[in-house]
Image: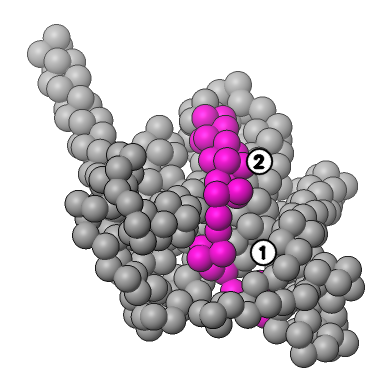
Amino acid sequence: MLRQEHLLSLEYEAYVGRKKLFLLGLGGLCLLLGLLSVAWGAVRIPVSEVIEVLLGGGEGRAKVIVVNIRLPQTLAAMLAGGGLSLAGLVMQAVLRNPLGSPFTLGISNAAAFGAAFSIIVLGSGTMQSTAADAVTIMDHWLTTGAAFAAALACMGIVLFIVSATGGAGEVMVLAGVALSSLFTAGTMFLQYFADDAQLAATVFWTFGDVSRASWREIPMMSALLALSSALFFYRRFDLNALCCGDETAVSLGVSASWIRLEAMVVTSLLAAVMVAFLGVIGFVGLVCPHMLRRFLGGDHRFLIPGSVLLGAALLTGADMGARLLLAPRLLPVSVFTAFMGAPVFVALLMKRRSRK
């Protein structure tokens, strides 16, 4: 009996060790992609020179490019990718729906409507063209604030519908689909009455792109991702219980309705901030959790840190590919993630079906 328990203990330690090793590998991949993302672009900078700048040295054009352009862009890609992936993972857990993601609840379309309202109605759509032909919305904070407010309003409406109907995960998904269609129609209505400049500014904003990021967005994105990750890791066993069903969770002493409400508020806030700053970026929150479960299983002790790392690596790699594909022009990263994410997701579904 003691020998059997000892063998089980060794097997469990080996199981945990493999998961930790995988997470360590993801962390190394993030660091590698981060360095390459800062080094590669229209102007190539040697990795050794990038490291020198990051350590406080370097000078001239390379330092300006690294510090003012590529480093905040790379950090924004990592933070947004990690945040969207984490939000998708938690939504899929509390909704018990494999299609759960920040976009399932209409958050992205609501943010797009808020940005369109700001540009067309509130007049933040004045644009300028730089020497590189990069279109910039002049009133950045008004547009971002309107997008954020619309995303939070969408979240509030969904939660109100759920509380009024007494529904659970499936009601949230259906309410999100309905609101997504409603906000899309609202955006199209505003665009119909917009002039050329306003229409161009609206379309430009809806292209999810980390190249618009600067140092002013990084502190808020970092703080929100850190706090959300800490909260969900604290709730990791509650999320495991919820995945087994509300009845099982309640029998284990978990307040299913409260955990679900808390998770939806935090994930919606997390996704709303990322989308408001960078625009609509799809598939990261949907694909990353599914990819991760193939390697880490369903234990949220490992899925939560893994989702942050994989999302960061995926969006950083996608941004790097978008920059290099049509260099010196910058392809919006949302286009690249859609082209990359859709086939991967279909392949995962096909493999899952073939196993069944």
First in residue order: circle 1 vs circle 2 = 1
Is 273 magenta? The answer is no
Report x, y in % for residue 162: 79, 49
- Going 70% across and 42% down the picture, which residue do you hit? 265
- Going 57% across and 69% down the picture, which residue do you hit? 208
Crowdedness near tag 2: few (<14), some (14–19) or many (≥20) residues, C-alpha within 10 Å:
some
Residue 31 - label? none
Quadrant position of the N terminus in the picture: top left
Taking 351 as reference, is 78 left or right?
Answer: right
Whether residue 256 is visible to the viewer of this picture, yes or no, is no
Report x, y in % for residue 96: 56, 49
Crowdedness near tag 1: few (<14), some (14–19) or many (≥20) residues, C-alpha within 10 Å:
many
Is 229 magenta? The answer is yes
Above/below status of 252 relative to 311? above
- Badge 2 marks a residue whose secondary structure is helix
- Going 55% across and 58% down the picture, which residue do you hit? 213
- Going 59% across and 61% down the picture, which residue do you hit? 278
Span of residues in magenta:
203-232
Taking 143 as reference, is 337 left or right?
Answer: left
**Closest to the observer: 277 or 130?**
130
Quadrant position of the C terminus in the picture: bottom left
Furthest toward the left, the residue is 3
Amino acid at circle 1: Ser
Amino acid at circle 2: Val
Furthest toward the top, the residue is 2
Q: Which residue is mark 2?
A: 266
Secondary structure mainly formed by the magenta segment: helix
Q: Total marks drawn?
A: 2
Q: Which residue is mark 1?
A: 108
**Closest to the observer: 251 or 80?**
80
**Closest to the observer: 300 or 246?**
300
Report x, y in % for residue 223: 57, 36
